Image (cartoon, grey):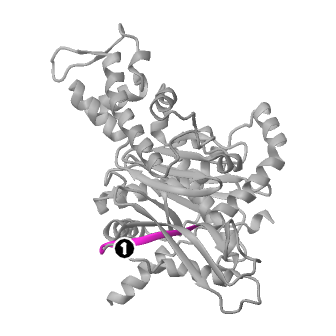
Amino acid sequence: MNHEQPIIVGLDIGTTKIAAIAGRKNEYGKLEILGFGRANSNGVQHGMVLNIDQTIKAIEMALKNCYDSNPNLEIGEVYVGIAGHHIKSLQTRGDIVRQSVEEEISQAEIDRLIADQYRTYIPAGDQIIDVIPQEFTVDNFQNIPNPIGYSGVKVGANFHIITGDKNAIRNINRSVEKAGLRTKDLVLQPLASAAAVMCDQDLEAGVAIVDIGGGTTDLAVFYEGILKHTAVIPFGGENITNDIKTGLGVLKTQAEQMKVQFGSALSDEAKSNAFITIPGLRGMAPKEISVKNLAAIIQARMSEIMDFVTYHLKQVGLDTRMLNGGIILTGGGSQLKHLIQLTEYVTGLNARIGYPNEHLASGHIEELAKPMYSTCIGLILKGYNDYENKSKQFEDSFKKIPVPETLQQEPVDEVLDVTEEAKPIKIKQRKTLKGFMDSFKIGLIDLFKEEEDAKL
């Protein structure tokens, strides 16, 4: 049955990099990576596409690298992530009184309830990206995860509605189309990252996923199996690099290199007698930079980002010891030394790094298990969730493409043992996570098309 699974492509248009990853599920429900390409990103700032031409060039470069890794690939449709400080979320409540009370509640009625939410009033210039049901009620019974099969007079739900700026959405779609691709769906980046790094226990325990990217820090909060809150904080790794550049009077490339090689999120942990020597510009004397000063700059900006995280958790009343799963840090910025300690200190919650290997088949290249690819792998998982829900919309047969040797790696025995033992648990987790992702009914592309049609 494996050859019938479609190949799904995630395209992560980030501030510092653009990544394209093609994947297909194997017979164990794990993702096999069939193609991988990345390129440096120039036209994107704070997660928003500003220069369309530069973004198109970067997407084309990432695609070229993806084809180079596997010439048998054919890429037409992609799942694209969206972030940026224009993203907002609001909570709404919706109810419908049922016409045929004798029958059980059907999927069509739930779809109608969700469709009604797309008519929620939002400010001019914004557009609804996603409507996510949180918990349902049937008559006086509350906290029902899935009401299908229940009977009652009135069915309702609390909804989490995510909106974004129409122009920002249009710029993403235009860049993707001009690079010769079709946007199959737009997915909120924190939700994609969450899907890649979360397992069933995390969903149950309650976690905050903090994805520290180049231009933004994305937040998704889950509690009692429900998505409670999403936010996009307009600061990320680029801000830290710029602070180092300004604070220490160095070039941006030098600032980035120092951050990655010698940076620490805790100045107390940095050696006070260690210095970095930077060559001087055009014959000037070399610069001596204190590692402790470098860490102090990083700590100041990282503490600010974590203060925002705490603020958002307070807003939804989950800042105390409510989240048993604590904070999962992911994204490229999560690789900073001592970031876990700083996060725990600022937020008062346990923290760990989330790697996107939760759903990857064994034998993939190590590069792809880095936190910076969480969003991209999550986009493929989102695509599979759509496929499993509406498989009729996809073609019935897909040609078999083997995983190229360049994307394979000799699996280590120990790793294999762990995978073998964990197999039944993983498959069980997948189902529950799939259930959670099933609630994403994103009609964004259809809406976008309707809007364009209306103009014509």
Residue reaching furthest to the bottom: 99
Q: Residue at x 76, y 65 (%)?
A: 3
Residue 372 drawn above or below residue 443 = above
Corner quadrant of residue 100: bottom right
The residue depicted at 61 percent of the width and 58 percent of the height is: 226
**Residue 287, quarter of the rendered image:** top left
Q: Residue at x 69, y 53 (%)?
A: 32
* Circle 1 residues within 10 Å: few <14, some 14–19, many ≥20: few
Q: Secondary structure at mark 1?
A: loop
Is residue 50 rendered to the left or right of residue 210?
left
Q: Amino acid at mark 1?
A: Ile
| Magenta residue check for 30 | no
Residue 330 is at least partly visible in this image: yes
Looking at this view, is 80 or 304 the one in front? 304
**Relative to residue 298, is residue 35 drawn left or right?**
right
In this figure, which residue is indicated by the disc labeled 1?
A: 122
Question: Residue at 63% of width from left, 44% of height from top?
Answer: 406
Specify the quadrant of the image occupied by residue 23.
Answer: bottom right
**Nearer to the camera, 96 or 81:** 96
Q: Position of residue 40 (x, y in %)?
A: 39, 47
Instruction: Please give the count of numbered marks on the rendered protein.
Output: 1
Residue 128 falls within the magenta-colored stretch:
yes
Residue 111 percent across, percent down from the top left: 61, 80
The residue range painted magenta reads 124-133
Quadrant of the image for the C terminus? bottom left
In the foreground, 35 or 263: 263
Residue 301 position within the rendered picture, expressed as x and y whole percent measured from the top left: 34, 34
